[in-house]
Structure formats: structure tokens, C-alpha cells
Amino acid sequence: QVQLVESGGGLVQAGDSLRLSCAASTLTFGSYTIGWFRQGPGKEREFVAAIGWTGSPTAYAHSVKDRITISRDNAKNTVYLQMNSLNPEDTAIYYCAARVRLDGSYSSPEMYDYWGQGTQVTVST
């Protein structure tokens, strides 16, 4: 069983930056692909970014790829999501998820085996 804990969310103003963290409780963290998803008020959960177990490949949702960077530090069992130029449409609960499988779409939530509880990001105007 893998436990994932997200942190770094909060209330920010439009144009600000945030860095979210996803910490995992497993000695084999380097074997997992990690994805970030978000769910805004009244919206379905949507894919944000993913990173392979070596740090590549990376994948981004088209809507965020110019503003968001995903990275990982396997020595710290942590994946980061750097978000810049935040706008109110980025308001959501952000979840990280882990998967072992190498095949299948990075953007499909059903391809992930473990999920964190989420961290709230609120962007005000």
C-alpha cells in the first residue's frame, strides 16, 4: 500500500505562484509514475500533469502546459508541481496519484492505483 500526502495549497491572488508537493510512504517510490489531477467546484476531476519514474517522460494538460512544471526527487520520495501565473480557473482540490503500470494514458484517472487526500488551491481575483 502506498500513502500519498499532498501539501502546499492555499489561498493566493491571481498571478501568484505555488509549489505543491506530493510525498509518498514507500521505499519503491522510484518505481511509480506520479500524476496530478484537480477537481474544481462543480467540475469533474481533470488531469494536470504526470511524470515517469525516472523523471521522464512528462505530460501536461494543454490548458496548463505553459504555466506548470512537474518534477520529482526520488531520494525524498516527493513529486512537485510548480504552478505559475495562477488564475481563478485554477481553483480546485489538487490530488496526486501513483501507478505502477507503464502503459495506458497518463491522463486517465482509472489508470492510477493510489490517491492522496488532496490539497485545496484557491485563487482570488
Image (tube, rainbow, N blue to C red):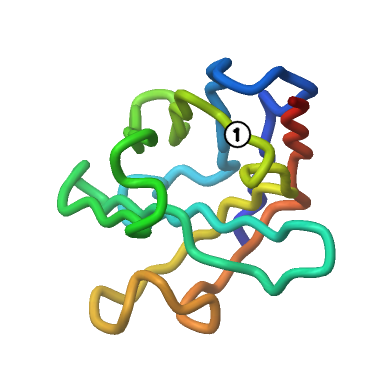
Quadrant of the image containing the C terminus: top right
Element assignment for label 1:
loop
Q: Is 69 left or right of 123, judged from the image as shown?
A: left
Quarter of the figure with residue 13: top right
Task: Give the left or right position of residue 94, taking residue 65 as reference.
Answer: right
User: What count of labels does the image hold?
Assistant: 1
Residue 95's x, y, as percent?
Answer: 64, 52
Relative to 116, 34 lies left or right:
left
Residue under the image location 83 percent in, 68 percent down: 42
- Whether 2 is drawn above or below 101: the answer is above
Q: Which residue corresponds to mark 1?
A: 87
For the N terminus, which image quadrant?
A: bottom right
Q: Residue furthest front?
A: 125
At which x and y percent is residue 53? 26, 51
Q: Of the residues shown, which amino acid type is indicated by label 1?
A: Asn
Q: Position of residue 9 (x, y in %)?
A: 71, 28
Q: Residue at x 77, y 27 (%)?
A: 124
Q: Nearer the viewer, residue 76 or 9?
A: 9
> Is residue 42 placed above or below 48 in the rendered structure?
below
Residue shown at 45%/43% (left/top)? 27
The answer to which quarter of the image holds residue 35 is bottom left
Residue nearest the viewer, comparing 18 with 96? 18
Q: Nearer the viewer, residue 13 or 58?
A: 13
Q: Nearer the viewer, residue 91 or 55?
A: 91
Q: Position of residue 123 (x, y in %)?
A: 72, 30
Query: How busy is the neighbourhood of tag 1: few (under 14 within 10 Å), some, or many (20 plus)?
Result: some
Q: Residue at x 40, y 72 (%)?
A: 107
